[in-house]
Image (cartoon, rainbow, N blue to C red):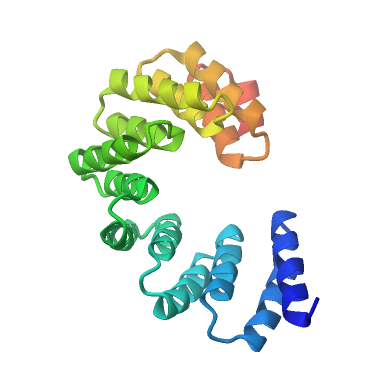
């Protein structure tokens, strides 16, 4: 292996192990060897995204896009970084660009729908997510997001239906269990809310948001001991 191949292999393996800071060292070394390489730049952008450093992630995705302006996946990836940085309008613009480059890209329609939900453009959000499902029928994340949009519309029966569909497609989908629990909170079915939010925590015990969601269900049920424990 030459230096370039070695650095790439080490970087990829470290990313798989979630050792992001060391992975960055090797990808930056690669960037010194090949400064105008979109793949290296997008790998660095993805590492910053996984670290939750969305500003740096966006910076490197933009550099990658300058080198590969027709790569629709890069527009989707930078859209995700903007979305997680809570800039939903810019995220939506990038997802639209991804769709313009590839009109049959279900992930981008799903992500656009999610952004439009946050922008309270609920009817358009539902249209986009349904388009994603038309292109990719077995898509649990899209059903989860469709449930999310209907929850915003206060249509709890439809929301429940779509969260259940997401769970049926992926029985280990912790977020969908937690969201289903949220619907039962809205419907004042507190025992069901606790059951499903507890299930979410059992599947993914390292996610603080799931513990917080469970704590709300306990507290609303006047179970203060468990509520403050999970908070």
User: Residue 50's x, y, as percent?
Assistant: 59, 58
Residue drawn 67% across and 34% down? 205
Farthest-out residue, left: 123
Pinpoint residue 62: horizontal percent, then vertical percent: 43, 75
In the image, is residue 78 above or below residue 182? below
Q: Is residue 87 above or below residue 189?
A: below
Count of numbered badges drawn on the protein? 0
Please give the name of the residue rendered at 61% of the width and 64% of the height, measured from the top-left corner. 47
Q: Given the current orientation, which residue lies at the most extreme right position?
A: 1
130 left or right, relative to 23: left
Quarter assignment of residue 101: bottom left
Quadrant where the N terminus is found in the figure: bottom right
Q: Position of residue 68 (x, y in %)?
A: 42, 75
Q: Nearer the viewer, residue 176 or 118?
A: 176
Q: Residue at x 35, y 51 (%)?
A: 108
Q: Is residue 165 visible?
A: yes
In the image, residue 142 above or below residue 102: above
Where is 156 relative to 7, above or below?
above
- Left of 149 or right of it: where is 16? right
Looking at the picture, how far across and down is residue 13, in whole percent? 74, 60
Q: Quadrant of the C terminus?
A: top right
**Among the 4 quarters of the image, the one containing residue 16:** bottom right
Nearer-the-camera pick, 152 or 129: 129
Q: Residue at x 43, y 60 (%)?
A: 73
In the drawing, does residue 21 fall left or right of residue 185? right
Query: For residue 131, what is the image quadrant?
Result: top left
Q: Is residue 185 visible?
A: no
């Amino acid at each position: 292996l030459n230096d370039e191949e070695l650095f790439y292999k080490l970087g990829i393996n470290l990313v798989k192990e979630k050792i992001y800071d060391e992975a960055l060292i090797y990808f930056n070394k690669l960037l010194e060897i090949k400064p105008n390489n979109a793949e290296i730049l997008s790998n660095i952008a993805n590492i910053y995204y996984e670290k939750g450093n969305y500003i740096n992630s966006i910076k490197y995705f933009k550099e990658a896009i300058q080198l590969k302006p027709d790569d629709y996946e890069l527009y989707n990836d930078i859209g995700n970084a903007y979305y997680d940085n809570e800039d939903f309008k810019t995220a939506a613009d990038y997802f639209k660009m991804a769709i313009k480059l590839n009109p049959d890209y279900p992930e981008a329609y799903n992500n656009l729908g999610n952004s439009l939900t946050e922008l309270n453009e609920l009817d358009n959000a539902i249209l986009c997510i349904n388009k994603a499902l038309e292109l990719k029928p077995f898509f649990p994340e899209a059903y989860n997001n469709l449930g999310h949009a209907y929850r915003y519309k206060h249509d709890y029966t439809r929301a429940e239906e779509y969260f259940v569909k997401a769970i049926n497609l992926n029985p280990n989908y912790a977020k969908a269990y937690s969201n289903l629990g949220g619907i039962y909170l809205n419907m004042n079915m507190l025992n069901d809310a606790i059951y499903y939010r507890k299930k979410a925590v059992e599947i993914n015990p390292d996610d603080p948001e799931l513990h917080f969601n469970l704590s709300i269900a306990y507290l609303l049920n006047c179970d203060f001991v468990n509520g403050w424990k999970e908070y």
